[in-house]
Amino acid sequence: MEYEKFKKEYEEYQNYENSLVFPNVGRYTAESTNDLVNSPSHYTRGKVEAIEIIEEAIEDAASVQAGFNQGQALKYLLRMWLKDNPLQDAEKAQWYLTRLIESMR
């Protein structure tokens, strides 16, 4: 799927999600909850969310596979100090980076 098409569909989904109202709860927004699915703290710490960094970084990837591997490596690097086992996240990033490098040879 092209990045721009994905981005548009994602924005439409976000608009839909933000329009939901639950009885006795009020309007649902990812920002108003400590939601481990939509807005976990290890992805939203800092000035820019990890997903925004990753989406921008992979825009010019040579292939879907390359973009995926780059995005996964970035994901683990961006959150490694915010989780219980930074070494494990560094190793996962290395695994994806190795796959990316091998695919470029």
Image: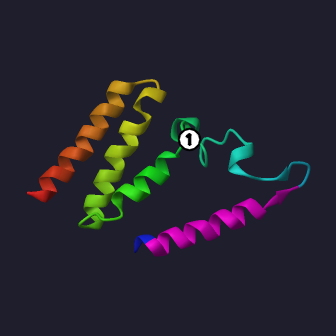
Q: For this view, does 79 lie left or right of residue 20? A: left
- The span picked out in magenta is 4-22
Picture coordinates of residue 16, whole percent (x, y): 71, 67
**Split into 4 quadrants, where in the image is the N terminus?**
bottom left
Residue 15 inside the magenta-drawn segment: yes
Picture coordinates of residue 36, whole percent (x, y): 61, 41
Which quarter of the figure has residue 17?
A: bottom right
Residue drawn at (75%, 44%), measured in percent from left and top?
Answer: 32
Q: In terms of depth relative to the viewer, which is nearer, 85 or 45?
A: 45
Residue placed under numbered mark 1 in the picture: 44
Residue drawn at (35%, 33%), measured in percent from left and top?
Answer: 89
Q: For this view, does 46 lie left or right of residue 57? A: right
Residue drawn at (30%, 38%), measured in percent from left and top?
Answer: 92
Which quarter of the figure has residue 46?
A: top right
**Split into 4 quadrants, where in the image is the C terminus?**
bottom left
Picture coordinates of residue 101, whole percent (x, y): 15, 51
Q: For this view, does 52 lie left or right of residue 35? A: left
